[in-house]
Amino acid sequence: MTESLLQWRDEYLIGVEELDFEHQDLFRRLNELQQGIAAELEKARIDDYLDAIEMRVEAHFALEEKFMRETRFHRFAAHKREHDEFLDEVRGLMDRFAEAHDPEVVGTLFRELKRWIIHHVVESDLELATVAAAVGR
Ligand SMILES: [Fe+2]
Ligand SMILES: [Fe+2]
């Protein structure tokens, strides 16, 4: 079964340019990964996608956390915990893929990334839109 691609929607926009840009970049990269899986690319290529995604996710979380600190966002601790738990999960799946090179694992990883990112952007990141508007960003 082919997993459907992520669909960007403008209702996901927070109103902070850098964060919105990175969210769209992550959607695009996840779709490239999914297309790579569907095309049965060799492991080295899939690894490149995964490494880039991991790096981008880490950098994105760091930037978002900086924004939350600067704006004294009241739910900072809970939001950061969501980021940390997600990174743990992603790294676990990546390790499993590195060991087994199992296409099933990378498929699971894509579904997990997709499910999480939509949920997180819609439920948690969008709370930052209010903060961004309040501080005039
Ligand atoms: Fe976030
Ligand atoms: Fe985010």
Image (cartoon, helix red, strand yellow):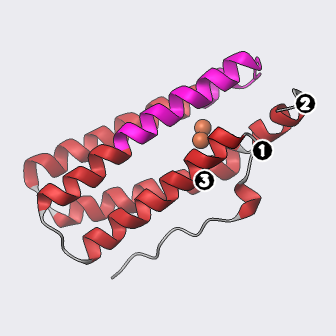
What segment is highlighted magenta in the picture?
Answer: 54-79
- Camera-side residue: 22 or 81? 22
Residue closest to the far bottom: 1
Magenta highlight: main SS: helix
**Which residue corresponds to the image point at 34% horizontal and 72% vertical from the top-left?**
35
- Camera-side residue: 102 or 132? 132
**Which residue corresponds to the image point at 80% horizontal and 41% vertical from the top-left?**
129
Does 20 sit above or below residue 131? below
Does 135 sit above or below residue 106? above
**Residue 68 placement, left or right of 108:** right
Ligand 1 neighbours mark 2 (CB distance < 8 Å): no
Residues at discs 1 and 2 in contact (Cβ within 8 Å): no
First of labels 2, 3 by sequence position: 3
**Which residue corresponds to the image point at 58% horizontal and 70% vertical from the top-left?**
7
Neighbours of disc 2 within 10 Å: few (<14), some (14-19), many (20+): few
Does 125 sit above or below residue 136? below
Q: Where does the image place residue 74, in percent across and percent down from the top left?
A: 77, 22
Q: Amino acid at mark 1?
A: Gly
Residue 134: image tag: 2
Q: Amino acid at mark 2?
A: Ala
Q: Mark 2 or mark 3: which is in front?
A: 2
Ligand 2 neighbours mark 1 (CB distance < 8 Å): no
Q: Disc 1 to disc 2, how far (Cα)?
A: 11 Å
Q: Where does the image place residue 128, in percent across and percent down from the top left?
A: 75, 36
| Residue, disc 1 | 15
Q: Where does the image place residue 75, in percent across and percent down from the top left?
A: 72, 26
Residue 119: image tag: 3
